[in-house]
Image (tube, rainbow, N blue to C red):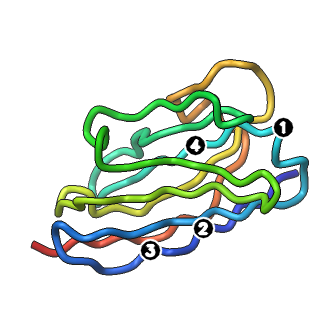
Amino acid sequence: QVQLVESGGGLVQAGGSLRLSCAASGRTFAALIMGWFRQAPGKEREFVTNISRNSGSTTYADSVKGRFTISRDNAKNTVYLQMNSLKPEDTAVYYCAAKVGGLMLADREASYDYWGQGTQVTVSS
């Protein structure tokens, strides 16, 4: 079992920045592929970004490329999402997710085994 707890969400003006954190427990963090997803009101949950176990590989959704950065600290069992140049359309509940097996990064929800409870990000115009 893996427990994931997100933090760092809040209200920010367009153009501002936020950093989300996701603390993991219950399993060796370095063995997990980590990802961030988001769900806006009335929409399906969508992939944002992911990161490999050793931080060597990352992928991003086109909508956040160049603005968001994922990173992880295996010593602190934490994955981060730095969000810059935020837009109103980034408003959503942000979820971190953990993938236990496999070698490849994944952008499908079904590929992830554990999920956090989510943290709300609201970007005002």
Q: Is residue 53 above or below residue 119?
A: above
Nearest the camera: 88 or 45? 88
Q: Residue at the location (52% across, 29% down)?
A: 108
Residue carrying label 1? 31
Q: Residues within 10 Å of mark 4 (few under 14, many from 20)?
A: many
Tell which circle, 4 or 2, labels the residue nearer the N-terminal end: 2
Marks 4 and 1, how far apart in space?
13 Å
Residue that badge 2 annotates = 6
> Residue 114 placed where, x, y %?
71, 47
* Corner quadrant of residue 120: bottom left
- The x, y position of residue 71, in whole percent, is 57, 49
Circle nearer the N terminus (3, 4): 3
Q: Are marks 1 and 2 in contact (CB under 8 Å)?
A: no
Mark 1 or 2, closer to the camera: 1
Q: Going 41% across and 46% down the picture, which residue do you hit? A: 45
Amino acid found under the numbered disc labelled 3: Gly
Q: What is the secondary structure assignment of the residue under circle 2?
A: strand
User: Which element carries disc 3, helix, strand or loop?
Assistant: loop
Q: Earlier in the sequence, mark 1 or mark 2?
A: 2
Vertical arrangement, residue 1 with respect to residue 50, above or below: below
Q: Are marks 3 and 2 in contact (CB under 8 Å)?
A: yes
Q: Which quarter of the rendered picture does the C terminus lie within?
A: bottom left
